[in-house]
Structures are given as structure tokens and as C-alpha cells.
Amino acid sequence: MKKSRLLVVAIIVAFSTITTAGYSQIRLGLRGEVGLNKASFSKNAIEVENLNSFKLGPTMEVMLPMMDFGVEASLLYNNDRMDVSQISSGENNIREEISITNHYIDIPVNLKYKFGLILPVKIYAAAGPYARIHVGGDDIKFSDVTDDIKAKAFEAGINLGLGVEIIKRLAVGVNYGMQLTDNYSADKPVWSDALNNKKNTWSIQATVYL
């Protein structure tokens, strides 16, 4: 119930400013985002490597006139990929590796502020919460593990972004995401710690406005 309420609140915040259309500047665009994370997370029984992500979807920006301040909300398809290896402690030192792909719908809602340098270039800063809904993908399953390790159905966190906007059509920036929830449920601490250690992520994003 709490997860559903949080999602409803995020959607309401994202689109509530539409009621002020007569006093605001509304733009629609297409946003793409690529993860910049190549980190490796390792425990004595598991390694997580090659974390990659790609996001794509529509974006709506609502700015208050003469203030360069407003709200930006997006609805993004998110494809997450990573390699997971189980390390055997036996004499043969058997290493079993699988590739995992999961699919999410991301709903980031950011407050956004712009300030100009030399026209037609502006710098923008953005910050706000995001919700992530798991819609499908692979379970983590090794041959000697009884239970599948599943991605959680709902995640949440905070985004911080900084970038530049050129001729009011193209915005390019860097985003820093901080997870506030775990993304995998696992009973074994060595599995849970490694899989859920990806708390902070970097990505580069670009938005083309119509």
C-alpha cells in the first residue's frame, strides 16, 4: 500500500502543473540516458560486474515564465544489464557466470532551474525523487542455489543533475542517482550485500525537445 501511495504522489506531482498552463511554458521531448558504471562488486561467494543501463522515453517540462524555474517529469523504459558470477570454494575452483537483464519503468520528477551564460546556451540544475517499477526480466539462478533471487517490484531514490541546454532544443547533462531502497531480495548476506551495493550510479543523458 505504501509503495502504491508513493507512486501516485509522484505522478500527481509530475502532472499537477498542467493546470497552470495559461501561466507556464510547457515543452514535450524525448529523453535518452546511458549508464556510465563499470564498477565491480565482489564478496567471497559472488561477484557483480559490468553494470550497464539504457533508458528512453517521453519528457515533459513545465517552466514558470520570467523565472527559469519549473518541473520536469519523464516516463522512461529502463534496460538494466549485469554479469553475476558465483565463486566456488572447492578444490576445483569452479566459476559459474550468468548475464542478467531486467526491464523497468522509471518515473523521475525533478525541480529544474536554468541560468544563462552566452545565448543561446543555458546551464541547468535538476533534483528530485524517482520511482522505478520492475516489469520483467531474469531471475538470478545458479545450479546449486535452491531459491531464485528476484528483482524487487518497486524501487525509489533521488536524482541530481547538471547540464547545458543549446538553442532551446537540445539538453545534455550528467545525472547522479542515489538509491533509497534495495533492488534485490536475498536471504544470504553475501548475496544481498553484493547485489544491493549499487547504491549510487552515474549516467549521461540527452533530451531533444519538440
Image (cartoon, rainbow, N blue to C red):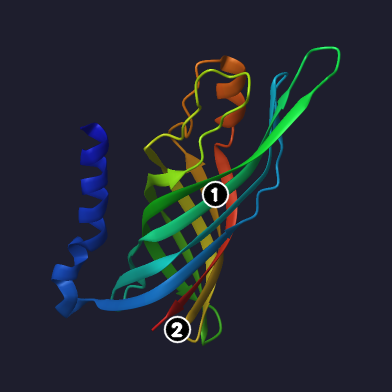
Label 1: element kind: strand
Q: Residue at x 23, y 76 (%)?
A: 24
Q: Residue at x 66, y 49 (%)?
A: 37
Question: What kind of residue is marked 2?
Answer: Lys
Q: Quadrant of the N terminus?
A: top left
Identity of the residue furthest to the top in this view: 90
| Residue 6 relative to residue 130: left or right | left
Q: Quadrant of the C terminus?
A: bottom left
Identity of the residue furthest to the right in this view: 91
Residue 97 in percent (x, y) is at 71, 34
Q: Is residue 38 above or below residue 94?
A: below
Front residue (pair 143, 45)? 143
Tell me the crowding category of disc 1: few under 14, some 14 to 19, or many 20 or more residues within 10 angstroms, Cα based: some
Residue 169 in percent (x, y) is at 46, 83
Q: Residue at x 20, y 40 (%)?
A: 5
Q: Which residue is mark 1?
A: 80
Q: Is residue 113 above or below residue 189?
A: below
| Residue 84 relative to residue 18: left or right | right
From the image, state whether disc 1 or disc 2 is nearer to you: 1
Question: What kind of residue is marked 1?
Answer: Asp
Q: Is residue 183 above or below residue 72?
A: above
Q: Which residue is mark 2?
A: 168
Task: Give the mark nearest the N terminus, 1 or 2.
Answer: 1
| Residue 62 relative to residue 21: left or right | right
Q: Is residue 175 above or below residue 17?
A: above
| Residue 92 relative to residue 138: left or right | right
Alpha-carbon span between mark 1 and mark 2: 30 Å
Q: Which mark is residue 65?
A: none
Label count reads 2
Residue 63 in percent (x, y) is at 31, 72
Label 2: element kind: loop
